[in-house]
Image (tube, rainbow, N blue to C red):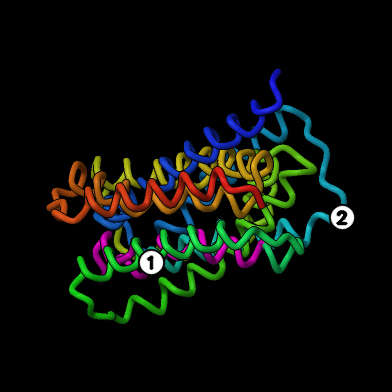
Amino acid sequence: MGGGSPARTGTVLAALGVVAFSLTFPATAWGLDGFGPWTLVSVRSVLAALVAGGALLALRVPVPERWHWGGLAVVGIGVVLGFPMLTTLALRTSTTAHAAVVVGLLPLTTAVFSAVRTGHRPSRAFWAAALAGAAVVITFTVQQSGGALSGADLYLFGALLVCAAGYTEGGRLARVMPGWQVIGWALVMCLPVALPTAAVALAAEPVHLTAKALSGLLWVAIGSQFLGLVVWYRGMAEIGVARASQLQLAQPLLTLVWSVLLLGEVLPMAAPVAAVAVLVCIAVTQRVRA
């Protein structure tokens, strides 16, 4: 296998993770069509944990060493519980386009967390391209939402911080264990919290079972919460947290496309221009050596 193959494979895997994540907001909107926010988040975590736990048991994966549990807890709090809960609460009153601002900021925030956590220092060219890409995405999403800040923004910015921390720890752990085991053990760790929360939420919030709501629930549970994170963490392990995170600059634009196809929202005229600018920034960050 050639020397560049791991990097190419890592980029492809991380990109597949981005595609899976880009469907999360539209799928969450579908899920909210029949489930309350606490029900949707807790049940998705329980379903994903059952799938992950079943795989871990079937393959007889040994329990991680005790010094890995702190990092796994950060992954669990950040990407299993924190990000889904905060973004779901935000999407009760925010459109998917407005919520996408958190995804536009996530690559840069993840790179900062990674630099602080690992001591790695990307080059100035990398940071310039990353900042430019983040600026394009932020300007695009805020302008399309009318420039007004809603009460949901507190949820969105909180989600941004906890998710960046979870991505950073997950990428670090994926260097010493398979990526699917990282998210798998994080999901299992959160089961004692998610299970009773689901029981209480199901009793307290009304449930209207529709095909759309069930489809949204299944996607955020299996696609976003488990399979997407499996390929994402493996990709980060191959090409590094900071570089992989820049692929997420395309995620808000992909989310807008899915919003048009799945939610019937109108695609803004500025989308093609923003897409080209973002893709240029991604190309630069992927080529610049740290």
Is disc 2 placed on a helix, strand or loop?
helix
Q: Which of marks 2 and 1 is in front?
A: 1
Taking the spot 38% from the left edge, 66% from the top edge, the residue there is: 135
Image coordinates for residue 190, horizontal then vertical, percent: 63, 57
Q: Which amino acid does label 2 sit on?
A: Arg
| Camera-nearest residue between 6 and 72 | 6
Q: Is residue 100 magenta?
A: yes
Q: Residue 66 carries which label?
A: 2
Taking the spot 42% from the left edge, 53% from the top edge, the residue there is: 249
Q: Is residue 262 magenta?
A: no
Mark 2 burial class by Cα count in 10 Å: few <14, some 14-19, many 20+: few
For this orientation, the residue located farthest to the front is 125
Taking the spot 29% from the left edge, 62% from the top edge, the residue there is: 206
Q: Does residue 197 appear anywhere in the picture? A: no
Q: What stretch is highlighted in magenta?
A: 89-114
Name the residue that disc number 1 marks: 135
Q: Is residue 251 left or right of residue 272?
A: right
Image coordinates for residue 77, horizontal then vertical, percent: 61, 64
In space, the residues marked 2 and 1 are separated at their CA atoms by 40 Å
Q: Does residue 45 appear anywhere in the picture? A: yes
